[in-house]
Image: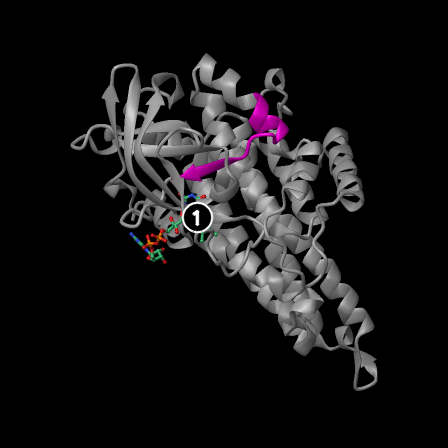
Amino acid sequence: MDFDLTERQRKRHEELLTALAEGTTERPPGAERPYDRERWSAAAGLGLTGLCLPGEYGGGDLDALDTALSLESFGEGCSDTGLVFAVSAHLLACGVPIRDFGGEAARAELLPGLASGALIAANAMTEDGAGSDLGTLSVTAERDGDRYVLHGEKSFASNAPAADVFVTYAVTDPGGGYLGISAFAVPRELPGVQVGETFDKMGLSSCPAARVRFDGVSVPVRLLLGHEGQGSAVFTHSMAWERSCLFAGYLGMMNRQLRLCVQHASERRQFGKAIGSYQAVSHRIAGMKQRLEGARLLQYHAAWLLSQGRTDNGAIALAKVAVSDAAVANSLDAIQLFGGSGYLRETGVEVDLRDAVPAVIFSGTTDIQRELIARGLGL
Ligand SMILES: Cc1cc2nc3c(=O)[nH]c(=O)nc-3n(C[C@H](O)[C@H](O)[C@H](O)COP(=O)(O)OP(=O)(O)OC[C@H]3O[C@@H](n4cnc5c(N)ncnc54)[C@H](O)[C@@H]3O)c2cc1C
């Protein structure tokens, strides 16, 4: 067992941190930055929109572990977690299924733009009646010659207001259950695609999200991902990548947050001493470190398994739960450590909590991941 990063991985981390520090991806403390194409392009310029997409289409050709490590660097070097999430969702929930299930024509049409960041993608799976329970999808796709006609509405798609292409899922065989769903890449310009108003969210403000409606959208067969009826498998595969890699961005966030807390605890003085000399404070920081390191090992393990071609849904669920729970707990601790100033937007501390809370919801809620873990134990 080797826990060391390779020289190459270390170098990539250093280079990304340096480039991010010089780039335009940073969010000034306290500022709520809405979606900004310029900062998206700055991240894309660093190769972040195409990390694990094929080199022949302009991607970085990275495996899952290296993708996770790069997203961790992104989360550490860029305090705009909304941007980190937006890029990661584009790459993992959209780029990956097109990479692995798109036909030659779909790959050639979409992957170069997705890798370079010239095209933005949104994953549209969730519906009003189908959140955790994806067996109740209502969006339908009916074959009509060399096209599929899509009808219905998706209720929550990150990146949607900015997106050029949607990866979406629709029922092609109403009685088919798991095999009754198909996956599609749907260009926004197709007639009948309607994106709703941008949601007013609690956090991740620079990742805009909205509803997406398909009103008789006629999608060419070449944009079917996988075979008809393979949609559930396509989605499961994309979520394995998302849960194994996207959450590494939160590891980076926690790293940055921890450094800030140590600095504050060393500099802030009360009762004549640095607050870090009080055990209540130092042990809180020790607890933050422990949660971060435990979550990191689980995340690396899940990503490493995926890199070996072994999709282990139990390991992936453990990682997802550990990182998202740690991100929320550490963000609460960070606010406590900063006292009243931690509660003020201008300090730039409370925003991490608002950005962390959705991590226990998206990509399969933490409760559902615990169900998977329990089922893996035979319960
Ligand atoms: C910031 C953010 C970004 C998102 N981005 C996207 C996106 O890009 N694309 C997309 O398609 N969707 C996206 N979503 C939607 C997300 O995937 C869903 O919110 C999530 O799957 C949960 O579905 P729901 O909201 O309908 O909650 P519900 O499924 O109604 O769940 C409500 C509560 O009940 C619990 N629960 C439900 N069933 C069970 C069960 N069997 N056992 C135990 N507990 C259960 C859940 O854990 C949860 O706590 C995003 C959500 C957020 C918050």
Q: Is the N terminus in the top left, top right, bottom left or bottom right quadrant? A: top right
Rendering coords of residue 259 (x, y %): 74, 59
Rendering coords of residue 355 (x, y %): 56, 57
Rendering coords of residue 342 (x, y %): 66, 71
**In the image, is 93 to the left or to the right of 276?**
left
Number of labelled discs? 1
Q: Is residue 117 magenta?
A: yes
- Quarter occupied by residue 317: top left
Do we see residue 92 in this rendering?
yes
Residue under the image location 44 percent in, 49 percent down: 362
Q: Is residue 49 magenta?
A: no
**In the image, is 269 to the left or to the right of 235?**
right
Q: Secondary structure at mark 1?
A: strand
Q: Which residues are magenta?
A: 112-124
Q: How is the image coloured?
A: one colour
* The furthest residue to the bottom: 271
Q: Nearer the viewer, residue 193 or 372?
A: 193
Do we see residue 297 in this rendering?
no
Rendering coords of residue 222 (x, y %): 39, 16
- Quarter occupied by residue 307: top right
* The furthest residue to the left: 175
Residue matched to label 1: 210
Q: Nearer the viewer, residue 327 or 358?
A: 358
Residue under the image location 57 percent in, 50 percent down: 295
Q: Is residue 342 above or below residue 314?
A: below
